[in-house]
Amino acid sequence: MRRFVRKVDVVPSPNIWYHPEAYERENRAQDAGGAIWAALAEDAPWAGRDVLDVGCGDGFHLARFAETARSVTGVEPHAPLVHRAERRTAGLAGVSVRRGTAQRLPVEDASVDLVHARTAYFFGPGCEPGLAEADRVLRPGGVLAIVDLDTRHAPYGDWMLADLPHYDPDKVDEFFARAGFACRRVETRWRFPDRASMEAVLRIEFSAKVAERAVAETVRRNAGRGSGEFVLPVGYRVLVRAKPSGLLHSCSVEGSPRMP
């Protein structure tokens, strides 16, 4: 999930590109109680609707949407992950995966009811082209739902800020508020089956120095837990904005491809 440029040894582009196995462990550990899904179901329901998952990675979340959605399309810029997502969702009715970016979504105008992005691209100032594209592909009344980590929530947020000294949570919150988003803060639990899984995930999420701190603090938090599991509280922001019902389409990013 790391994505802000910094002078450390964690790649600022999505770590799933380079550590897909560790990222699979992370996806399985996240939101063990389903708090994010519950918030999305209330604020951005998808049953019977057409869903677009931007930055879908290897397609981990596509099957969950497909349980009740009319159709689900995953968009991912990294070709190897597109192939993994296609294999993962093979045989699921109504699910497709396309290669593309948030700035140039490979779908028609006004063709989906929900655009979902989870810890992908929409991180604050600079994501305006993607916001415009989301409005383009949404039908009137459709919803853009952005799920991202909450740096105000300890301990995970503290570790993030240790690696991102120039990140300003106030400016990010102000950016999304000005853009018309409602924000719901959600506390989740990440649940790892063992220490190896926990360490593998934290070491791809943080620089070496911060990862050592994160691992040590997580071990202390779970001291005495007899199951061998490691549980970590992690906060998220669920940001939701509806496209006005009277707006047929918004201006597209210049050069954005349109489907024939």
Image (cartoon, rainbow, N blue to C red):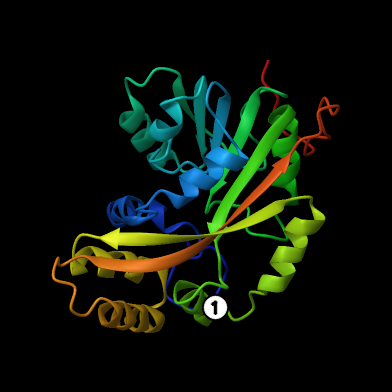
Q: Residue at x 45, y 51 (%)?
A: 35
Q: Nearer the viewer, residue 4 or 44?
A: 44
Residue 127 x %, y %: 70, 53
Q: Residue at x 35, y 51 (%)?
A: 27
In the image, residue 123 above or below residue 251: below
**Is 205 left or right of 241, judged from the image as shown?**
left
Q: Nearer the viewer, residue 128 or 146?
A: 146
**Is 208 left or right of 239, judged from the image as shown?**
left
Residue 78 x %, y %: 46, 43
Residue 202 x %, y %: 34, 69
In the image, residue 125 above or below residue 139: below
Residue 152 x %, y %: 57, 73
- Name the kind of residue labelled 1 in the image: Leu
For residue 10, say whether it is visible.
yes
Which residue is disc 1 drawn over? Answer: 161
Q: What number of labels is visible?
A: 1
On the rendered image, what quadrant is the C terminus found in? top right
Q: Nearer the viewer, residue 101 or 71?
A: 71
Q: Residue at x 52, y 26 (%)?
A: 47
Q: Nearer the viewer, residue 44 or 167?
A: 44
In the image, residue 206 above or below residue 134: below
| Image quadrant where residue 9 sits | bottom left
* Label 1 residue SS: helix
In the image, residue 148 above or below residue 241: below
For residue 101, say whether it is visible.
no
Q: Residue at x 56, y 71 (%)?
A: 151
Count residues near mark 1 (Cα–Cα under 10 Å), then give few for <14, some for 14-19, many for 20+.
some
